[in-house]
Amino acid sequence: MIDIFWTILNIILFIVFLIIALRGIILIKKDLGIIAAIILLIGLINSGNSNKENKDFVPDNFHATVSYDDVIPLGKWQKIHLLIIKDVDSNQIQSGKTSMTGVECGIHWEEQQMKLFVVENGIGYKLTGYKQYSLLGFPVYKQMKCFDGVADLLFK
């Protein structure tokens, strides 16, 4: 329930921010001219962009791999999807990646550590990360989460 409240609070604060920013642009346009207003608008738009780190996930020899996945409930409104790629020939784990789906406005998943190991009926994992709450992009609270389990074959 706190996740829905947090999402609604973030949306309301964002709308208030947009109203204040638009009023500021109108005032600057009156006093300093259209060029200053355009520069401020471009600055506001660029301040919202964030470059997320994109890790190389798919191995070079993708044809010789099998995929495993698991869905981990992070709360009532979010899920963590775990995808693991294992080499068929050497039976070695190539890589693993997590992503969060569900209500995400102001709530982020940050993976800290993932241990993967081969078990009889799939691939075992121990996953540690943080569920981070933020207001308008500023971190407010981090909650540590730990999961363990066995991922099944993605395509059987």
Image (cartoon, grey):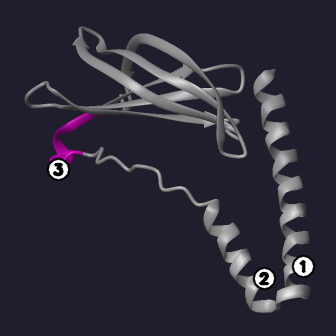
Q: Which residue is mark 3?
A: 60
Dot 2 falls on a residue whose secondary structure is helix
Q: Is residue 76 left or right of residue 54?
A: right
State if disc 2 and disc 1 touch (CB < 8 Å): yes
Distance from Cα at disc 1 to Cα at disc 2: 7 Å
47 is higher (above) or lower (below) than 129: below
Q: What residue is drawn where x is 17% and y is 50%?
A: 60
Relative to 42, residue 16 above or below: above
Badge 2 or badge 3: first in the primary sequence: 2
Q: Is residue 147 magenta?
A: no
Give the residue at mark 1: 26
Q: Amino acid at mark 2?
A: Ala
Which image quadrant is residue 35 in? bottom right
| In the foreground, 27 or 45 | 27
Q: Which of the numbered marks, if any, corresponds to residue 37? A: 2
Characterize the local packing of mark 2: few (<14), some (14-19) or many (20 or more) Cα atoms within 10 angstroms: many
Q: Is residue 62 magenta?
A: yes
Query: Which stretch is magenta?
Result: 59-66
